[in-house]
Amino acid sequence: MVTALNTKSRFDPHYDVVVIGTGMGGLSAGLHSALFGQKVLVLEQHNLLGGFATSFVRGRFDFEATLHELLDFDTPENMGPIRKLLEDAGVEYELNRVPEPYVIVLPNDNINVKLPFGIENFIETIEKEVPGSKKEVTKYMKLCNNVYEGILYIRDCAAKGKKPDKMKMATKYKGFVENVYKTVEEVHKEFNIPEKAMKLITPYWCYQGPALSELTFVTWCYMICGYLTTGAYVPTNRSHALSTSIVERIRELGGQVEFNCKVEKIHVENRQVKSVELADGTIIETDIVLSNAHPHVVYGRMIEPKSEISEFEAKKINAQTPSCSAITVYLGLDREPDELGIHDYEYFIGDTSDVEEIYKSFYEFVPSKWVSAICLDKAVPGTTGKGICQLSITGLVMGDAWKNVTEENYFEVKDELAGYLVDMFEKALNVNLRDHIEEIEMVTPETWSRYTGAYKGMVFGYEQHPWNGSLIRKVVDAEETKMSIKGLDFVGGCSTNAHAYSCSLTSGKEVTAKMLKVMEKEMEVNK
């Protein structure tokens, strides 16, 4: 039995819940543990909170690090689940609505099209660009929306503690039932949508990572219809402000948040969490550990002793495919966006629209074939400052693609990639950025790994395949919990909710409630 050390430290000997990491999932877990009346300690290895939900300063520019747009907010009058989550928790926030979903620019296909919010508007814009496509695109979007509404119905039932009505699912949400195990590509083959129209429909795929031949159709429908029907939002003062606000609320509720506290070990005895051990040797007893750290890291390095890890747990984490990391160049520009020819918030730019080819390139050490570019000032006017603006350009990669980069050539590689991304944007939009760059910063999978501790620098969680999508994870979660270490669960990108800011926030609430209920039952059994 491991016992607590250093009783005069800033830590109490025992906490009901210990949360590892202050990413959105960890912060939400800490917040809801406190709301549920638990004595909670949130530990962050960095000196800054937020994980990927952060910002950084270069010169007079305060850059948003990662957030592109938040899903599931909707309006104050028609609250989406994330807006309601923050409202119910008493978290203060300020949001700006993103003006449009995206602009897709494919120079080799002579495509430069801005897509609007609203399913009907979306369809009409595609029809304008691809005359004669409306009937088939309408049929397709109707199916997507049926799946989306089916998910909302299931989620509503879960929130009320009810099981979905089988007859209702089979009739009203027939599209969901018939396509729940299919990939996006499999469903697309059932439609006769013109190639150009499909290119306009599918850019959001990169928000998930896997190619359309692997991505579950249910996940795809929730994402595209969620954005088109409820809009997209960004925090007015960057994602770091939202992280800070959540930390402040945790502390108001009596929770404890500590920085520069790296958790090295999770001590387990007889398949039950007993304590965590910090890098300085401090041991803190707890019954529940909610980890925002990646399962590969937890099971690979942190569980002590290793003999407590079951064959099931080892097989489970190794069966799943870790998703993407990213490269991003951040530009501080000495003009306002419109002066530079940047008229929109988000651009998807591709050398090709072949998703399979793009996805395959993630595994290779090659320049990005597909990028997302964000100009924050077009969503939050003037946020960077008067007469200036910021632009970030991001391409996805798999962490292993960087395995042969050495210390000797690392900075040269970074410079080359930064130059490539700038060139890609300039050529696609026919603009001049180089003469207006005041600040520039380039980050890689190594940067993400070093800054956040993310496994292989991953910015997403596990890939969502039909056998491992979020919905399937939730269906099997109760049984898998019985076979897992008692008192240990995961929040954030690798939770049952999967990745993205909104999913991470909901994971914190759902996983915390589940774990407290499980532990309550354990206590009843042991009485």
Image (tube, rainbow, N blue to C red):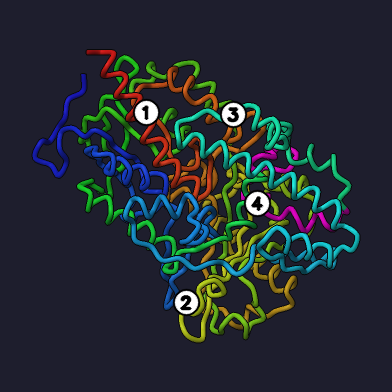
Kindly indicate whether the residue at mark 1 contacts the one at mark 3 (C-beta within 8 angstroms). no
The stretch drawn in magenta includes residue 371? no
Three-letter amino acid code at disc 1?
Leu
Q: Is label 4 or label 2 in front?
A: 4
| Residue drawn at 51 percent across, 86 percent down | 387
Q: In the visual, does 395 lie left or right of 447?
A: right
- Tell me the crowding category of disc 4: few under 14, some 14 to 19, or many 20 or more residues within 10 angstroms, Cα based: many
Q: Where is residue 229 in the image (x, y as percent from the top left)?
A: 62, 56
Quarter of the picture containing the N terminus is top left
Question: Is there any visible trace of residue 215 in the rendered image?
Answer: no
Residue segment shown in magenta: 194-219
Q: Earlier in the sequence, mark 3 or mark 1?
A: 3
Residue 488 is labelled as 1
Q: Residue 225 carries which label?
A: 4
Q: Is residue 83 above or below residue 12?
A: below
Pointer 3: what residue?
Answer: 165
Viewer-proximal residue among 337 and 305? 337
Is residue 118 found left or right of 233 in the rendered image? right
Separation of disc 4 and disc 2 at Cα? 31 Å
The circle drawn on residue 384 is 2
Neighbour tally class for label 1: few under 14, some 14-19, many 20 plus, Cα within 10 Å: some
